[in-house]
Image (tube, coloured by chain):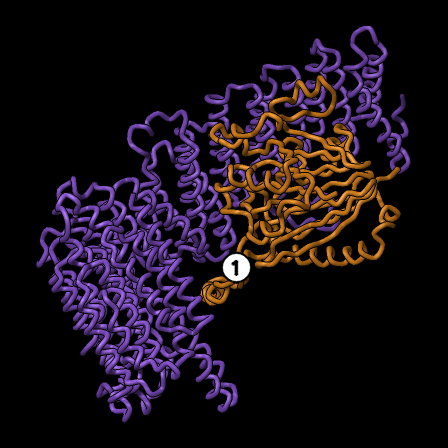
Chain colours: A purple, B orange
Amino acid sequence: MSNNTLQEALTEVRQQESQMRRCLEHKGKIMDAVKHASTLLAELRSSTLPPKQYYELYIVVFDALAYLGAFLKDSHPTHHLADLYELVQYAGNIVPRLYLMITVGTVYMGMDDAPVKEIMKDMMEMCRGVQHPVRGLFLRYYLSQRSRDKLPTLPEGDENAATKGSLQDSIQFVITNFIEMNKLWVRLQHQGHSRERDKRTAERQELQILVGSNLVRLSQLEGIDKTYYRESILPAILEQVVQCRDILAQEYLLDVITQVFPDEFHLATLDIFLDTIANLNPGVSVRRIVITMIERLAAYAAREAENETNTVAKQLKEAHLDDAVDNDKDGDDKGKDKDEEVTDPLTAPSASPYTEEYHRGIPASMDLFKVFWDHFLGLLKARPDLPLEDQMAILGALTKLSMNAYPERLEFLDQIFSHAAEKLKAADSAATSSKETVDALLAMVLAPINFYSRLLTVLSVPSYLELLQSQTAASQRVVAIAVIDSVLKEQAHITDIGDAEGVFGLLQILIVPRGAAAQSEDEESEDVAADQAKIAKVVHLLYHKDPDTHYKLLVVARKALSAGGQLRKYTYPALVFSTLRIARRYKARESVFVDWMQRTTALFKFIHKLISDVSITGRAEYALRLYVDAAQVADQCGAEEAAYEFFVQAFTVYEEAVSDSRAQFQAICIFVSALQQTRNFSLDNYKLLISKTAVYGSKLLKKPDQCRAVYMASHLWWTVDDDDEDDDENKETPEGEESGTASVRDGKRVLECLQRALRVADACMDVAVQVQLFVEILNRYIYYFDHGNTEITVKYINGLVEVIQNNFNDDGAYDAQNIEAPKKFFDRTLDYIASQKEVDERYESIVW
Amino acid sequence: MLVLAIGDLHIPDRAIDVPTKFKKLLVAGKISQVLCLGNLTDKQTLDWLGSISPDLQLIRGDQDSQPSSLIYNSLPRSLDLEVPGGTNASKIYAGLSLFKTVQHGELKIGITAAHNTLSLHDPDTQLIIARQLDVDILICGGAHRVEAFELDGKFFVSPGSATGAFSVEKYTDDGVEEDEEEEVNGKEENDNENEDGKNDEDGKNKEKEESKGDKDDKDKDEDGKDESENKEESETNGEETKITEPSEAIPSFCLLDIQGSVCVLYVYMYIDGDVKVDKISYRKLQ
């Protein structure tokens, strides 16, 4: 319905516009054109159009009038604007009359000889004639738009100011217009039916930008200094804001003020601004207004801090350059704000009796944080009903401000956090658990972690941990993850015991298993594993150049991680390997620490406990592996007792917990591999351990596994020096240690093993498997033959070759297909023997 | 074609992560296949390797038997491993997934973890495995140091640990390493001069060993203080004047550039915050 009205209106406007244009273009009939303009303007008298449609109409009218305005400008002074200004007063209706008047008047303002001041005054007066809210708002918006670039900016004392107007006149003009528009805007709320109030509010929101535009205009006027802003402009605006007592207007306008005026102005008028907040309609959401201002200044401080470092860097750089260049650059590169900071004392503005120093853009004489803080406390007194979530949100913004403007003043953060913690304690649970409160708090506790590049900074804020621990588990977890990510990103070693305790304190929530779910140990989610992996990585960041302190750090970590219950299986291995590192570092200080052996023993006891805990958490096979790793390192460190004990523990785990036959086979491979590398066992101990391993091998369930384990075990009686292949580098095992296991070479036992392996292979029913095993054993024979084991004689090799050949010839026993792989392996082995004949005459006697 | 050999990552139990500089080098698009030599113990790194090339081949390392290592549950079925040595042998080895072979051009490559073969310091046992698998190149995980040598016409490579993870292997001290380093450098020039004539000088045993570990760079910063500490201590002890911190594994991996019967091995090492690259070439004897 109203759409039709709009369409009709638009049609009428376009029609009249084209007639107007025709009058102007072809005949220069200005009076006729003005008449058409007046007719089309009559459409703006509508009071049925909703604001949005009225706006559409306004746009079309505006364009039409712009055309008229341009034409009038060109035809001046033939058709003198002063005359026209008088003429249009005769238009019949007030709305068209005033639009025409403004059109002519603002064009006239742009002329050199115009009595600008008088025109401005007159237009402003006349506009009072329209008191219908929507029509009035648009009329004044038109005034504001058209006069935008014509407003005078002459200083007060200028001789032309009396006629041409001054900057002050312009300011008054805009402020008056603003005040009048605001009144109209507020009045709109109170029109019509009370049941349409919400609709009315929505409409007003659509129109708010018209009112706000005045403030934008004001901020764009050049030459306003902050003293004038403080003394004349802001009080006038704020007076209107307070007086209107309208919630929407107060919230919106204070937001606009915060957004459009420069940071320096805000700093200079913060007290006035904040005092105003106390006088607002109780229904106003103070929170948003305060936060917007705090965040604006916090961002400003952050920007300025960056500039400061840049400036300092630049100054340092320029100090080496030519002075003249220096001066030139100053002017070009630095904006106004920065100039202010670096001006030397002699040329500093004389407004203040002393030279202002700036820190992060904030005058040193001003304690910005305290200003806000006092205001916040005052606000709480004035508005005891301020919702908890609002309080927390404001505190969150203050956190940001404190960090950006005063990064080194951690006591401010402490003040905020302890206040928040107190409030939370006092509040009822419904308020503390509301989503908004939780979110606000989470943002607050996360902020310093993300802000300080050195994470541990937050640890020196006493109340931080208290506040953190009063958060929901979910929030704490988010913070803990942020902590870890930050620590890992930094990659800096944690060297201080207190820091280590602090970090693990922050991670507490992740370390401790989540409620009842953790009791069932079967399937932890991937998330849990990922979190725990991160904690494990933190363990690797613990480091100190002094191994004793490093050890203490790990003790701290163990203490913290011990709360993990089943989760320890993810984190303890990292502790084990970190501690093993220390064992090596102790070993390196063997000659310096008189009691290094005692220290080392203590370490291995610590490790022992760690691994047995891993074993308890159900990772038995992994514990086995860890015991073997620890044993190897203990052996290298000369801690024989510990090494022996670790092997015994590994064997115990094997016997008690490893039941899968594949796992058993792999465990034996691990035992053999590790034992073969040990060097410092006494011969008795070594023999005990290797015999046990060999026995395990011979007890494996499946024949092929058994066979392989047994021939692998043969290597235990034939140690190969690490550097055997580097002919002249044999210093790894000094003479004194020859009594250890470095020299175990018992050819006889090797032969026994291989022969036992052959017997096991012989018992295999599957010929293909059997022959595969035979070839594998043949290769071991050749290996030992090569290594000069005199027990392995040509007789054995020839015998085995013959057995294998017979097997292949007995083609009834297998499918040729199955035997192909072992056959090829066998051929390759024979090729190798043949090739060795060229370099080693002992091979000559191997024949087939 | 480029094949990446990488292994022994041990994240998070022994190391935090692969050096960022390695990660920047190893991105999708250039590498046709990734051979991972075990001890790939976290999902994130698995995903990363998978992103380098969809053709990701894995074997089981010594630490991978851990039941809670979620990673193996999350592997796609197609990654199930086939084992060389014939159908029966594969039946025996199946599930353990200890060995694997791939064919590129004229070269057959085998991968395994060292503890299965006792090969950590014993080229002769590695030779048996290479013979058994019938491969030209055997890449062995488990030893946390880079190593590459030729033996009996076959090429043996240990790409070391990509994270420089703590190794339980016995460590050597600095003096020995420096000697090795020089030797390596000398050989390297040689390699560059007559890359293709390499097999001419092919003896029975030709070895090249990369340095196993400089001093850990983390310790570097604190060196100054360490020394003063040492001075104090040295008064009580006449002979030893300097504490040498145990060397730690250097993060490393290998790239194999395979063309026909020639494989050029690029060894990447992360030393003191920089990536160092060495080159060795191998040609299969016909």
Which residue reaches farthest top?
A812
Q: Is residue A259 above or below residue A765?
A: below
Q: Is residue A662 left or right of residue B103?
A: left
Is A348 in front, or is A323?
A348
For the C terminus of chain A, the image quarter is top right
How far across and down, in percent of the image, does residue B80 sit?
Answer: 62, 26
Q: Position of residue B16 (x, y in %)?
A: 49, 47
Percent across and percent down for residue B109 are 74, 35
Name the residue located 23 percent from the left edge and 58 percent from the top edge: A134
> Residue at the location (45% across, 53% down)?
A489
Residue A407 seen anywhere in this rendered image of the structure: no
Q: Locate residue A110: give its quadrant.
A: bottom left
Out of A606 and A378, give the one closest to the viewer.
A378
In screen coordinates, is A447 left or right of A524?
left
**In the image: residue A435, left or right of residue B72:** left
**Residue A156's image quarter?**
bottom left
Instruction: Say if A184 sits above or below A530 in the image.
Output: below
Dot 1 falls on which chain? B
Q: Which sits in the foreground, A1 or A324?
A: A1
Q: Which three-letter amino acid code belongs to the residue tagged 1?
A: Ile
Residue A526 visible here: yes
- Where is mark 1, residue-wise? B243
Which x, y percent locates residue A413? 24, 60
State the quadrant of the N terminus of chain A.
top left
**As displayed, is residue A26 above or below residue A826?**
below
Q: Nearer the viewer, residue A119 or B93?
A: A119
- Disc 1 is placed on an element classified as loop
- Neighbour tally class for label 1: few under 14, some 14-19, many 20 plus, Cα within 10 Å: many
Rendered residue at 52%/59% (across/down)? B243
